[in-house]
């Protein structure tokens, strides 16, 4: 589904990703772990099309198309979803209206008719229940005055609504207490199936107790330095990221 | 047009000629002659005066207008119904180029204690009352355009509500302006008197046909007695050739409440002046507004809130969206006299700039001579946030739609406060349309 080859990315003339390789197939969950500043967020942003980054070398193919050719919204239409680390607040933009606009934009891109209000309401309520998102929050402005946990649930609810092929969870665990983390993870797990893939970007192993990855990659200094199964995450937790650096040096 | 520009003083004099058609009423003739006299002496608005510094009033004096003689037959062919808002039930007053139109107005089923008539009718039927009210306004000593309005005064609306009468259905004033063979100057005058404990809602709409070319110099005087409440909506959506000067003067007695929501979306040059005068304690006013301004447009708001007595409160919240080479002026003055202790006054002006070439001159002013008051003011000028646009686009929403949603979100605070749903929906449509014109993708 996703194939990243020798990716080099600069931001403001500073090289952040230095030859990253990653292959993600449908049905797989990949965890990307790594110390601060390793380039985890850059990877999330480059996949979703955020401006301000420049690719100096390498390729990103999504379902055999050059992903880098597409605009932010086109990537969304093709099935890429980024659950953000810091979902922004949109004062004055009603959450329900936003969700409807978003879902219908996706449907339109697929050549489908927009959902009518009643069908849409039903669908949103169903998805909100999945992540235990208070229905009152649907009537409020997008993320405005939401708690950290509510914002993350709103993200996962959008994911459930839009049913992307590839989801990138960017540090979804940051700022969540254990209960919220469990609810968010359960939401994510119900969406797992053989057609969908996920990239879970995280600093801590904690989230991976709830969302069990098929693969764990360690991203350090702009490259994947080690890959393995979920055991690798446990090992990292125990020994810390410095362990890898020592191993590197050895 | 190729006519040579004339001096502003002559421009004013030409437009203030006595009317040949109106029948003579002595007290009114005197009042109008006084206004003409003042016109020939008063200071001419000029960019060197603080109140007119950014407004480019010179552009108005370059236009060639004629007094509308009211004989224009094209009125009959106008599609006035096209301006009606479906599902909006009102006592409807239609003024065509400032003249009351019985044909299109609907003022039946008024409750007892409510007088809603054309100003011309009122002048003939209640000369004592009207001469008093009009003399009061002459004393307000405003600028030349108020005197120009008085000099041309012939029609408009007169609304009077008796003590403790609640007028539930809103009064809607549709000001339709148009120019056919000639560019015209129009001077409607509206007078609203709410007696003790009375309440009403007014929807004041300014519309025009096609790309009509005219100067609408309207003047509204409002008197609120003790405990009276008025909710006043004002929507200017005129042609891109229109010059619009709207003066609203409000006099408030104890514990009265005045609310104004002003939407200024159209016109080529549009200036709205809101003067609030607190005459007695515990009165309050809440003013809010939204202006959207683009290429070849000037939107100008002047607020003058005078706290001369203690314990009154005022709030002003105005928002602007500017695109292209649009230009807006916001000048909000809160004056608190030495005796006006316990004043509570807050003013805010927020502007969203969609283009680097747009210009806003925002001047919030607090002039405070009392020492026990709560007052604040603030202005912000900002752009759409890239992070917010990214968020919406990452959810599949096209860039242009995303920007429009954010603009509507910005404007929403003012629109969502509208208590009349059909009017709110109409304004949402108007604002969306104005934003579409803003060609949001083209922000350089």
Image: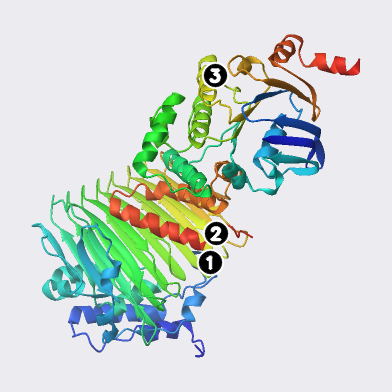
Asked whether the viewer can see residue A217, the reply is yes
At x 52% / y 61%, what residue is drawn? B438
On the image, numbered disc 2 is attached to which residue?
B361
Q: Which residue occupies the extreme top position in the image? A: A238
Which one is in front, B345 or A243?
A243
Q: Where residue A10 is drawn, which disc sits there? A: none
**Residue furthest out toward the left:** B112
The CA distance from mark 2 to mark 1 is 10 Å
Q: Residue at x 32, y 61 (%)?
A: B249
Reading the image, the residue beneath label 1 is: B53
Q: Is residue B83 above or below residue B423?
A: below
| Host chain of mark 2 | B
Q: Quadrant of the N terminus of chain A?
A: top right
Residue A181 numbered tag: 3
| Left or right placement of residue A229 versus residue B143 in this view | right
Looking at the rendered structure, whether the residues under marks 3 and 1 are on a common chain is answered as no
Label 2 close to label 1 by CB (< 8 Å): yes
Q: Residue at x 45, y 72 (%)?
A: B240
Tell me where residue B433 appears, x and y as whole percent.
Answer: 44, 60
Q: Position of residue B172 (x, y in %)?
A: 24, 62
Q: Are marks 2 and 3 on the same chain?
A: no
Give x and y (percent) for residue B42: 41, 76
In the depicted view, which residue is nearer to us: B420 or B347? Answer: B420
Mark 3 neighbour density, 10 Å: few (under 14) some (14–19) many (20 or more): many
**Percent position of residue A142, x then y:** 48, 37
Find numbered disc 2 in the image and state the secondary structure of the residue it sits on: strand
How many other residues sit within 10 Å of disc 2, few (<14), some (14-19) or many (≥20)?
Answer: some
The nearer-to-camera label among 2 and 1 is: 2
Whether the residues at callouts 2 and 3 have beta carbons within 8 Å, the answer is: no
């Amino acid at each position: 589904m996703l194939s990243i080859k020798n990716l080099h990315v600069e931001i403001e003339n500073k090289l952040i990703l230095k030859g990253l390789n990653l292959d993600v197939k449908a049905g797989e969950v990949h965890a990307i772990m790594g110390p601060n500043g390793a380039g985890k967020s850059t990877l999330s942003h480059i996949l979703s099309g955020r401006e301000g980054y420049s690719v100096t070398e390498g390729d990103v193919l999504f379902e055999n198309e050059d992903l880098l050719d597409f605009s932010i919204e086109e990537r969304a239409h093709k099935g890429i979803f980024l659950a953000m680390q810091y979902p922004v607040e949109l004062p004055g933009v009603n959450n329900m209206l936003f969700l409807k606009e978003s879902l219908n934009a996706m449907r339109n891109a697929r050549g489908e008719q927009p959902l009518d209000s009643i069908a849409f309401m039903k669908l949103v309520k169903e998805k909100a229940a999945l992540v235990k998102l208070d229905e009152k929050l649907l009537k409020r402005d997008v993320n405005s005055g939401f708690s950290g946990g509510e914002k993350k649930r709103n993200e996962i609810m959008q994911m459930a609504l839009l049913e992307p092929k590839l989801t990138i969870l960017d540090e979804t665990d940051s700022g969540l207490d254990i209960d919220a983390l469990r609810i968010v993870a359960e939401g994510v797990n119900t969406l797992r199936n053989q057609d969908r893939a996920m990239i879970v970007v995280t600093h801590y192993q904690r989230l991976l107790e709830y969302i069990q990855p098929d693969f764990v990659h360690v991203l350090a200094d702009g490259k994947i330095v080690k890959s393995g199964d979920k055991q690798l995450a446990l090992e990292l937790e125990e020994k810390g990221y410095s362990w890898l650096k020592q191993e590197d040096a050895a | 047009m190729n006519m040579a520009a004339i001096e502003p003083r002559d421009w004013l004099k030409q437009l203030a000629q006595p009317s040949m058609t109106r029948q003579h009423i002595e007290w009114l003739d005197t009042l109008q002659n006084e206004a003409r006299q003042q016109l020939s002496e008063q200071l001419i608005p000029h960019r060197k005066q603080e109140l007119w510094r950014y407004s480019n009033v010179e552009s108005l004096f370059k236009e060639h207008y004629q007094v509308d003689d009211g004989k224009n037959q094209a009125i009959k062919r106008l599609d006035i119904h096209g301006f009606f808002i479906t599902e909006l039930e009102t006592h409807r007053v239609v003024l065509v180029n400032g003249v009351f139109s019985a044909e299109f107005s609907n003022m039946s089923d008024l409750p007892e204690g409510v007088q809603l008539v054309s100003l011309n009718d009122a002048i003939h039927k209640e000369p004592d009352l009207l001469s008093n009210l009009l003399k009061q306004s002459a004393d307000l000593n405003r600028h030349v355009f108020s005197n120009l309005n008085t000099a041309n005064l012939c029609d408009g609306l007169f609304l009077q509500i008796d003590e403790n009468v609640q007028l539930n259905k809103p009064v809607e004033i549709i000001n339709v302006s148009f120019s056919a063979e000639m560019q015209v100057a129009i001077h409607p005058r509206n007078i609203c008197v709410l007696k003790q404990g009375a309440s009403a809602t007014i929807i004041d709409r300014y519309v025009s046909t096609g790309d009509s070319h005219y100067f609408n110099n309207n003047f509204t005087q409002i008197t609120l007695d003790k405990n009276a409440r008025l909710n006043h909506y004002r929507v200017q959506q005129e042609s891109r050739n229109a010059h619009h000067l709207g003066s609203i003067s409000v006099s408030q007695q104890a514990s009265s409440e005045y609310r104004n929501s002003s939407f200024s979306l159209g016109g080529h040059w549009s200036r709205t002046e809101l003067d609030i005068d607190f005459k007695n304690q515990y009165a309050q006013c809440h003013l809010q507004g939204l202006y959207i301004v683009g290429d070849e447009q000037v939107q100008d708001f002047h607020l003058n809130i005078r706290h001369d007595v203690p314990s009154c409160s005022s709030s002003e919240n105005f928002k602007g969206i500017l695109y292209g080479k649009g230009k807006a002026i916001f000048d909000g003055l809160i004056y608190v006299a030495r005796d006006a202790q316990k004043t509570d006054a807050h003013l805010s002006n927020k502007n969203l700039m969609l283009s680097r070439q747009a210009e806003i001159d925002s001047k919030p002013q607090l002039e405070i001579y009392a020492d026990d008051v709560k007052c604040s003011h603030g202005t912000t000028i900002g752009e759409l946030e890239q992070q917010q646009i990214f968020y919406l686009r990452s959810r599949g929403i096209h860039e242009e739609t995303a920007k429009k949603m954010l603009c509507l979100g910005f404007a929403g605070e003012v629109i969502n406060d509208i208590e009349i749903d059909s009017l709110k929906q109409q304004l949402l449509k108007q604002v969306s349309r104005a934003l579409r014109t803003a060609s949001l993708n083209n922000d350089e």
